[in-house]
Amino acid sequence: MTAEITREQLHAYLDDALSETESARVERALRDSEALQGRLRLVMQERDRGEHSLGAIWRRQRLSCPTREQLGSYLLDVLDEDLLAYVRFHLETVGCPYCVANLADLKALQQEPADRARQRRQRIFESSAGYLQGCRDTPA
């Protein structure tokens, strides 16, 4: 069973980037295999040293993830066909937990009552305006 769990899957497991099913499969394999536990320890040590491979940087920066703006456009169904296909693949096939959570947040905001959204925007504006006013009042 340990041969089935790749190094990339161990990284994704540590990043909490696997689906629930895949995470459960990795956890079962870890409980059953001392060799896999050793491989996981090595992966964790690499991270502690600061792994700087291209793959590690790609994962850390989530370079394959669509932006929040693109996810919003996906919700509004205004993406061009190629980007729509990619975002759909990223969400539905890859199941990126970061993007799925981001999309859920955008959906919740989209369903927010208008008066509540207006109040939220007003609070943000007031806090920003107060901050900017404070910056203007202090000498440079």
Image: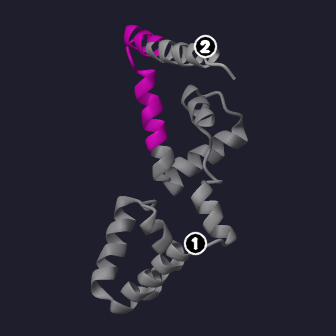
Quarter location, residue 119: top left
Q: Which mark is residue 137?
A: 2
SS at mark 1 in the image: loop
Residue 58 in sight from this viewpoint: yes
Q: Where is residue 9 in the image (x, y as percent from the top left)?
A: 48, 72
Quick one: 13 or 121, which is closer to the camera?
121
* 119 magenta-colored: yes
Q: Where is residue 89 in the image (x, y as percent from the top left)?
A: 58, 50
Q: Residue at x 52, y 78 (%)?
A: 7
In the rendered image, the residue lying farthest to the front is 139
Q: Where is residue 19 in the image (x, y as percent from the top left)?
A: 40, 59
Quarter location, residue 76: top right
Q: Position of residue 136 (x, y in %)?
A: 64, 15
Q: What stretch is highlighted in magenta?
A: 101-122
Q: How crowded is the residue under tag 1: few (<14 C-alpha within 10 Å), some, or many (20+)?
A: few
Q: Which amino acid does label 2 sit on?
A: Asp
Q: Which residue is drawn at 48% across and 49% down?
A: 98
Q: What residue type is labelled 1?
A: Gly
SS at mark 2 in the image: helix
